[in-house]
Amino acid sequence: MKKNIAFHLPILAALFINTSLFGWAAFESGNPIYRAVTPFSFIVSLLVFITGLIPALIRPQANHTLIACFSIFFSFFLSVPFEFSDLPVIHPGSPLVLFLNPYLIARLLQAAILLPMALHVSARFPRVTGTPARAVAAGYVLSAILLFAFFASRSAWQRVALILLLFVWFTFVILFFIRNLLQAARDPNPENYLDAQRARIVGISLFIAEVPLWIRPLTLALGLDVFSYNLLLLFQLFIPIGIAYAVMRHDLFGIDRALRRTLVYGFASLLLLTFYLFLTTSLTSLFADSLTSRPLAPVISLFVAAILFDPTRRLIQTWLDKWLYPDRLKFESAIQSMQYLLARANRRDEIVNLLNDVFPNQIGAEWGALKLFPEPDVPPPHTAPAWNTRLVAGSVTVGGYWLGPRQAGPQYEGDEVKRLHALAGQAALALAYANAYESLYELNRNLESRVKEQTERAVADEKSIAAYEERQRIARDLHDSVTQQMFGLHLMARGLKASAPEGFKEKLAELESLASGTLKEMRLMLDQLRDASGEEKVDFAESVRAECEAFSNRSGPEGGALLSVTLEMPRVVILPKNISNEAAWILREALQNVVKHSGGRTVIVSVKVDSFLHASIADDGAGFDVHAAPAGHYGLRGMRERALALGGGLTVDSEIGRGTILSYKIPLPR
């Protein structure tokens, strides 16, 4: 309310200034205002006055107040005609103001205010330009200085010079106004298309109206009476006509809907009043003829008319609302639809789509923007929201919501704002529910993942336990059967060697050594089977030396050592027990292959350690074709499978007559 009063005070001040000026002029000249004003000038002035005043009354804004003040000064300026015969006889030596008619003085004062006010309006209409406020204030000061210098001028050359300056100032203001309108009219930005259309219409109207207003002072200064004041007034009609067209066609000032509703509601109210009077009169006449008591006729007729009036009013009101307020009905339908959709939405992206896209389209808003926490609670850049609120669920702020203006023009009214706030509360609850639902869904999904992981781990543990138990069973069976038999064979060979003839002792000693070696291998295998964890650390170098010594200490068929082994490796190689056992098994199998198949007796065993365990066994035997290995031999295959099982690999490099190099590598844990 206080804001509207602040907008209306300048309008009241402009009315007071102009009425005071014309009151003073009428008093000083002795010519009443109703005689100075012609009917045609009064009609034109009234149209200009109403055209500028309506936007400020319907939609109070600073720009509309400025336009209303300008229209008040301009309408008073046009109301009193000025013809060539009204020019005073001027004598040099005295101030010019002494020779001027009071009405002419009032008009010159109004013109001095109108020129900088036109500059002020053009700096803000149809949109704000870069003209600084100091330049506008300087325009008011310049206009006042030129006018008072003109009033005080005493010589002819002073008056001529000041008239030329005033005319140049007038020309500059008109050109500045037209230039700003042309810039707005030629704006290619699609977002400013409507402003460009308005600027074209207003610019054309002002150009047609102001060109005669610019030409007439020239004709009067040259002493020519070729441009009558009524013709000038006729051209001024283009201003209210152009602005009225821009209001109705392109919603200039944003008052199209309100103006149409005001006019139609006024006409409808007049029709209802006429209908009520006609109904009352007709019923009074009807009852007066049929009733014996004439005083009862008006009472009965008023009573019946009152009963019929309310249904008629509601019927007309419903029809007018459908015709004049389609946006309100559209808004109500959109609110109900959104309430239904929000009540069933359980996903955040679905609610965001409803508020950002669906709802603005349903109510005809230019845009909608939902910002959810932790996004900044600010509207989108380069936008002018028409309504906004925070979405609060309980005591928690979920985010902020902004709506742009309606494309049709009308602002959100009081009851619509209440419905929007209620809808925002429902949207906040829906978002809080969606957040809780998504959190629960994510928790459930994580729980499912954890249950699956635990289940897989339990199954793996069960498999590991089953494998461990199976290895223990095999180890027991081997210990109870094969190991005992080998031990018995070893003892038998030793006993026979003691009582055998000399020719058999060497063979029995070899059999005893073979049984002893086999028993050692069996015990090593049993240790591997019983070791389920593989986490114990052992010295692989010791296992390599033991394997090589076992073959070096055995005699070959031709006499001498079975194998002559050269070791190239570090003194200590600490490895996990499972890797050490597998690598030793591969080494032992490779040495056995040298004895069985190569025919060589010299072997070089090389071991290196970095992030891998590298081992190679090179012999001087006959070699073989690696691409044509004989069928039924699975030694190489077993070695390769053991290396692959530990993530490593095995390669064989051999040619017939050149010996064989078997290499394997196994990755080591960090």
Image (spheres, rainbow, N blue to C red):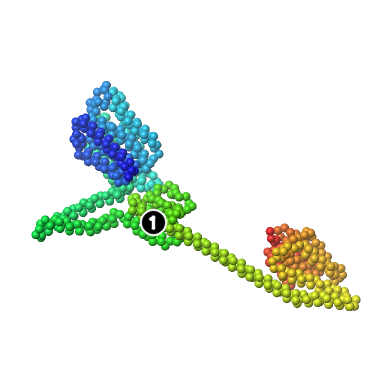
Residue 23 vs residue 36, the one in the foreground = 23
Q: Residue at x 27, y 36 (%)?
A: 16
Q: Which residue is mark 1?
A: 423
The quarter holding residue 501 reads: bottom right
Residue 595 vs residue 269, the one in the foreground = 269
x, y percent for residue 341: 40, 61
Residue 479 visible to an observer of this rendering: yes
- Which residue in the rendered view is the most extreme toward the right? 502
Q: Amino acid at mark 1?
A: Leu
x, y percent for residue 642: 71, 67
Image check: 339 left or right of 547? left
Q: Residue at x 38, y 61 (%)?
A: 340
Q: Secondary structure at mark 1?
A: helix
Residue 628 vs residue 367, the one in the foreground = 367
Vertical position of residue 407 compared to residue 127: above or below: below
The quarter holding residue 32 reads: top left
Q: Residue at x 34, y 56 (%)?
A: 331
Residue 434 vs residue 362, the one in the foreground = 434
Vertical position of residue 484 compared to residue 165: above or below: below
x, y percent for residue 472: 70, 72
Image check: 433 left or right of 113? right
Residue 618 visible to an observer of this rendering: no
If the image is split into quadrants, where does the C terminus sit? bottom right
Vertical position of residue 443 compared to residue 498: above or below: above
Q: Residue at x 27, y 21 (%)?
A: 93
If the image is split into quadrants, where does the N terminus sit? top left
x, y percent for residue 168: 33, 31
* Label 1 neighbour load within 10 Å: few <14, some 14-19, many 20+: some
